Image (tube, grey):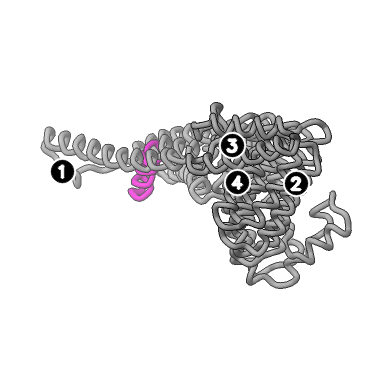
């Protein structure tokens, strides 16, 4: 859809230029031929008042018909499209300068035709009126088709999203930052959210993803005006967030991020509506939330970073409650990526994310969704490995989070995570940490270790055999690393055998 954005507007401009050029050449050629054929010059011709009245009547009817066609088209197309996306489209349409200019032109030229017809007295045939009459009629027919194309492009979902996004940006804090200004911005954020929700309701995948990306751009664009906003701008109004408690409103005011909360809330509502229905929208929302979090990190806005993390947690709980495996996989992937990206600059947040992953893994395990617990362990193991690779000060604490997974019922997947990490730590010189995992693995079931060894040794394809967002095979290891992990598991199995003997 993006590649076609503006295509019809460009076509309308080319068509308009072509029609004007073509009509001009045609009319000039016709007049030149007739004048030459009859041996006359243009200066010899005179317009009588009777001929002027006929022309005025003809142009008046033509303009009236054109105006009726345009208004009928607008009256049908605009309400239907507004009902599909947002009722505010009507307001957006009638505040567009080209739309206003076109409608005013047809109405004004129709009125002029009536006036010119009245002014054609028997004793007087005003040449200026005549010139305006025929020019307005020709221009009216020349612009009607390009204008139809412009309106169709205006109703293109990409155009609607872009214009709604522009309206949100126009409401950012400026000269006026009181309650009315805050209410206006909040209302326009909700309009963009409505576009997303209605697209999800209709299973309109492309529009939903484009609108989600647009909302992400709104948050990014808000960063600059936020830095210069006055304190009064951040006084979140209770009536704008009717579902929030007094304490929650107080938190928004303290963290000064009610705008980001309003935007992320729209993503949350869309996320809930998309679960089990539109996986691509779920993926897009998770990715957008991660980028919003990274932008807050770069901007030094720790409060908004924390807000994005809380929304990640909310997404996970909703996915677990819906038992949506795709959503869990996708949110975990983005959440893990955020934790890894923050290891060097904000390790305490990475540690916080690891703890959250374990918590929600435990939440999912209780209703019997054990794979979520195992997936959480795998992602925490990935965070731990990255932490030791970059020398993060949170590495030791992250390892403790991973080891806490052993408190639950053992599983082959958990043994795989620990074995792969232990081999990696041993290879990078972190012997003490590797020994801790080695000790934990000795309490694992022999069957789990044997299953882990078999899976690692037999997996030679890095691509998972189904189509997933991750697409990586969790059991695949590079040949050198695979050999190290298999060796470690062999050592453990031998130790178990000796202990039993």
- Does residue 130 show up magenta in the picture? yes
Q: Is residue 10 magenta?
A: no
Q: Which residue is mark 3?
A: 474
Mark 4, residue position: 287
Relative depth, front residue between 452 and 252: 452
Calculate the distance from the C-alpha at mark 2 to the C-alpha at mark 1: 93 Å
Residue at horizontal 69 percent and vertical 32 percent from the top? 325
Q: CA distance from mark 1 to mark 4?
A: 72 Å
Near mark 4 (Cα within 10 A), the count class, few <14, some 14-19 or many ≥20, is many
Residue 165 placed where, x, y %?
59, 50
Q: Which structural element holds mark 1?
A: loop
Which x, y percent locates residue 37?
A: 12, 33
Residue 286 in the image: above or below residue 247: above
Between disc 2 and disc 1, whose residue precedes? 1
Q: Nearer the viewer, residue 273 or 159?
A: 273
Between 167 and 47, the residue placed more toward the observer is 167
Which residue is under mark 1?
41
The mark that comes first in sequence, 1 or 4, is 1
Along the viewing direction, whichever of 152 and 252 lies nearer the viewer: 252
> Alpha carbon of mark 3 to alpha carbon of mark 2: how far?
18 Å
């Amino acid at each position: 859809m993006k590649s076609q954005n503006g295509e019809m507007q460009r076509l309308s401009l080319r068509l308009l230029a072509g029609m004007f050029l073509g009509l001009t050449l045609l009319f000039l050629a016709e007049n030149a031929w007739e004048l030459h054929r009859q041996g006359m010059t243009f200066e010899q011709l005179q317009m009588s008042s009777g001929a002027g009245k006929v022309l005025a009547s003809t142009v008046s009817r033509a303009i009236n018909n054109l105006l009726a066609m345009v208004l009928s088209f607008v009256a049908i197309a605009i309400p239907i499209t507004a009902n599909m996306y947002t009722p505010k489209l009507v307001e957006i349409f009638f505040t567009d300068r080209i739309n206003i200019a076109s409608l005013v032109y047809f109405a004004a030229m129709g009125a002029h035709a009536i006036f010119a017809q009245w002014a054609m007295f028997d004793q007087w045939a005003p040449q200026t009126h005549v010139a305006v009459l025929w020019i307005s009629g020709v221009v009216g027919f020349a612009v009607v088709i390009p204008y139809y194309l412009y309106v169709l492009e205006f109703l293109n979902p990409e155009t609607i999203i872009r214009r709604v996004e522009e309206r949100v940006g126009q409401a950012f804090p400026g000269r006026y930052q009181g309650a009315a200004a805050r209410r206006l911005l909040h209302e326009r954020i909700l309009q963009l959210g409505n576009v997303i929700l209605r697209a999800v309701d209709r299973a309109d995948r492309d529009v939903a993803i484009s609108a989600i990306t647009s909302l992400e751009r709104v948050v990014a664009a808000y960063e600059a005006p936020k830095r210069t906003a006055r304190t009064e701008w951040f006084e979140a109004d209770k009536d704008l967030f009717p579902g929030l408690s007094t304490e929650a409103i107080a938190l928004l005011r303290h963290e000064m991020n009610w705008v980001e909360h309003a935007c992320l809330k729209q993503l949350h509502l869309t996320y809930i509506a998309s679960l089990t229905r539109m996986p691509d929208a779920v993926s897009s929302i998770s990715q957008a939330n991660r980028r919003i979090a990274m932008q807050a990190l770069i901007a030094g806005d720790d409060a908004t970073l924390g807000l994005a993390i809380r929304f990640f947690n909310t997404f996970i709980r909703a996915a677990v409650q819906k038992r949506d495996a795709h959503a869990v996989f996708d949110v975990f992937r983005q959440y893990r990526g955020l934790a890894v990206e923050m290891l060097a600059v904000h390790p305490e947040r990475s540690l916080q994310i690891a703890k959250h992953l374990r918590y929600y893994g435990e939440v999912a395990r209780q209703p019997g969704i054990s794979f979520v617990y195992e997936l959480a362990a795998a992602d925490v193991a990935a965070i731990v490995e990255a932490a030791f690779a970059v020398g993060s000060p949170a590495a030791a604490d992250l390892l403790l989070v991973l080891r806490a997974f052993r408190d639950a019922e053992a599983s082959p997947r958990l043994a795989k995570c620990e074995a792969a990490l232990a081999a990696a730590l041993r290879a990078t010189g972190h012997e003490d940490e590797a020994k801790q995992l080695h000790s934990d693995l000795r309490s694992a079931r022999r069957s789990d270790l044997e299953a882990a060894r078999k899976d690692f040794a037999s997996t030679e394809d890095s691509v998972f055999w189904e189509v997933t967002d991750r697409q990586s095979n969790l059991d695949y290891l590079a040949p050198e690393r695979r050999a190290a992990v298999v060796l470690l598991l062999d050592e453990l199995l031998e130790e178990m055998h000796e202990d039993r003997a």
